[in-house]
Image (cartoon, rainbow, N blue to C red):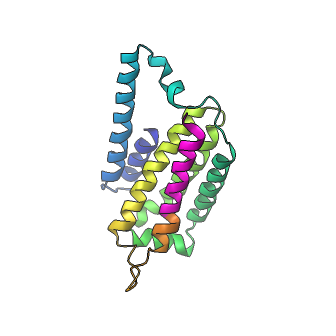
């Protein structure tokens, strides 16, 4: 939830009022927390919610580190966006005022899963937020008609490499490393 609260704050800070995706993510995260909390209370074990779903020690650890390296590399390329990232931002209609926010979101996305090596629920929460983030990224690419790259209707590079592969990687880390 903190990820989406910070995203909403970043949008508002730069004057962007298109908050639909961030508010949707926040609502889903809040609904998950409420439903899980209600289930735990019904089971008589509200303190055991995290331990029910999240591993005590994430394993294997190496996909978490690999995901973090990729996210931090992406963040570095976003500080002064390299050509393909700038094209990606432009193609999906990301307002230029939000471009400076993206590297910091990606730094948080890279450090959160690694923090999960010591505090597993932080890694699980960050990984879950990354899954939602990349689902929204895929939808932004589809909405921007990124998949249709001309007459061949092949999947566009931005949609496939930047969003879909990242989504699959985040789902894999979340499920394989953090969930029981």
Name the residue rendered at 63%, 51% in the picture: 68
Magenta region: 163-180
Please tell me whether residue 32 is drawn above or below residue 144 in the rendered image: above
Please tell me whether residue 2 is drawn above or below residue 38 in the rendered image: below
Q: Is residue 49 visible?
A: yes
Nearest the eye: 167 or 85: 167
Image quadrant where residue 83 sits: bottom right
Quadrant where the image shows the C terminus:
top right
Q: Farthest residue to the top: give it.
A: 44
Q: Is residue 104 visible?
A: no
Q: How many numbered discs, if any?
A: 0
Name the residue rendered at 66%, 37% in the picture: 117
Picture coordinates of residue 127 (x, y %)?
52, 44
Picture coordinates of residue 36 (x, y %)?
39, 28
Q: Farthest residue to the bottom: give it.
A: 151
Please tell me whether residue 169 is drawn above or below residue 96 in the rendered image: above
Image quadrant where residue 121 sits: top right
Q: Is residue 164 magenta?
A: yes
- Left or right: where does residue 105 sit relative to residue 77? left
* Magenta segment, prevailing SS (helix, strand or loop): helix
Q: Farthest residue to the right: give it.
A: 62
Quadrant where the image shows the N terminus:
top left
Picture coordinates of residue 133 (x, y %)?
44, 52
Nearest the eye: 13 or 49: 49
Name the residue rendered at 57%, 62% in the picture: 79
Picture coordinates of residue 147 (x, y %)?
40, 73
Q: Is residue 100 magenta?
A: no
- Left or right: where does residue 144 sit relative to residue 99? left
């Amino acid at each position: 939830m903190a990820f989406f609260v910070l995203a909403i704050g970043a949008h508002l800070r730069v004057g962007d009022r298109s908050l639909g995706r961030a508010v949707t993510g926040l609502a889903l995260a809040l609904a998950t927390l409420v439903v899980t909390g209600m289930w735990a209370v019904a089971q008589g074990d509200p303190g055991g919610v995290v331990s029910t779903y999240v591993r005590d020690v994430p394993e294997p650890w190496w996909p978490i580190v690999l995901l973090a390296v990729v996210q931090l590399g992406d963040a570095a390329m976003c500080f002064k966006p390299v050509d393909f990232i700038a094209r990606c931002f432009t193609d999906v209609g990301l307002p230029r005022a939000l471009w400076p926010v993206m590297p910091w979101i990606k730094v948080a996305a890279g450090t959160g899963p690694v923090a999960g090596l010591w505090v597993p629920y932080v890694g699980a929460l960050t990984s879950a937020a990354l899954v939602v983030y990349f689902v929204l990224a895929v939808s932004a690419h589809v909405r921007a008609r990124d998949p249709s790259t001309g007459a061949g209707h092949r999947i566009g590079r931005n949609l496939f490499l930047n969003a879909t592969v990242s989504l699959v990687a985040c789902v894999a880390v979340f499920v394989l490393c953090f969930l029981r």
